[in-house]
Amino acid sequence: MFVEHNKMEEKALPNFKGGEKEFNVRMFDDGACKIMQGRLQPGASIGLHTHEGNSEVIYILEGTGTVLDDGVYHPVAAGDCLYCPEGHSHSLINSSEADLRFFAVVAEHHL
């Protein structure tokens, strides 16, 4: 299957998972897997959340920010990859002055 994110409408999700501002996303979702291109404007974040029944991989495409991974803050930049397995928690924060763009896949474990 070919997923054409660039042909999808970008949706704004305000205060996603309790985060700040908006999470802008182009998303494919077939119920078993979400494949996303995401964008966080300066000062925006995805709130801290725990993955239950799924896991997530995030690859930073452009920009810089901070990830909170199981209680530990890490700086992130283009080329960095975060894996959040089932039962673990994370948040993504754009603490820079430019957009933070990333690619993410959330795979469901139990259907």
Image (cartoon, rainbow, N blue to C red):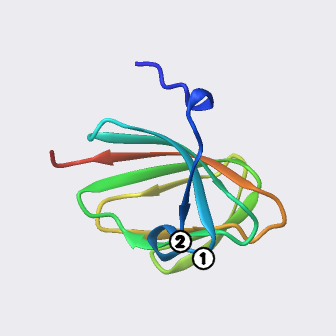
Left or right: residue 30 compared with residue 22: left
- Where is residue 41, by image quadrant? bottom right
User: Alpha-carbon distance for marks 1 and 2?
Assistant: 20 Å
Query: Label 1 sits on what residue type?
Result: Tyr
Left or right: residue 6 compared with residue 54: right
Q: Position of residue 66 (x, y in %)?
A: 66, 69
Give the residue furthest to the left: 111
Left or right: residue 45 compared with residue 107: right
Which secondary structure, mark 2?
Answer: loop
Quickly name the residue at label 1: 73
For mark 1, does the 10 Å Cα neighbourhood hold few (<14), some (14 to 19), or many (20 or more) residues?
some
**Which is in the foreground here, disc 1 or disc 2?**
2
Which secondary structure, mark 1?
Answer: strand
Left or right: residue 105 compared with residue 86: right
Q: Is residue 3 above or below residue 95?
A: above
Camera-nearest residue between 83 and 50: 50
Residue at 53%, 51% in the rendered image: 58
Query: Label 2 sits on what residue type?
Result: Asn
Residue at 66%, 69% in the rendered image: 44
Q: Position of residue 94 (x, y in %)?
A: 70, 67
Residue at 54%, 78% in the rendered image: 72
Instruction: Pick the quarter of the image with the C terminus.
Output: top left
- Where is residue 89, by image quadrant? bottom left
- Disc on the earlier residue, 1 or 2: 2
Quickly name the residue at label 2: 15
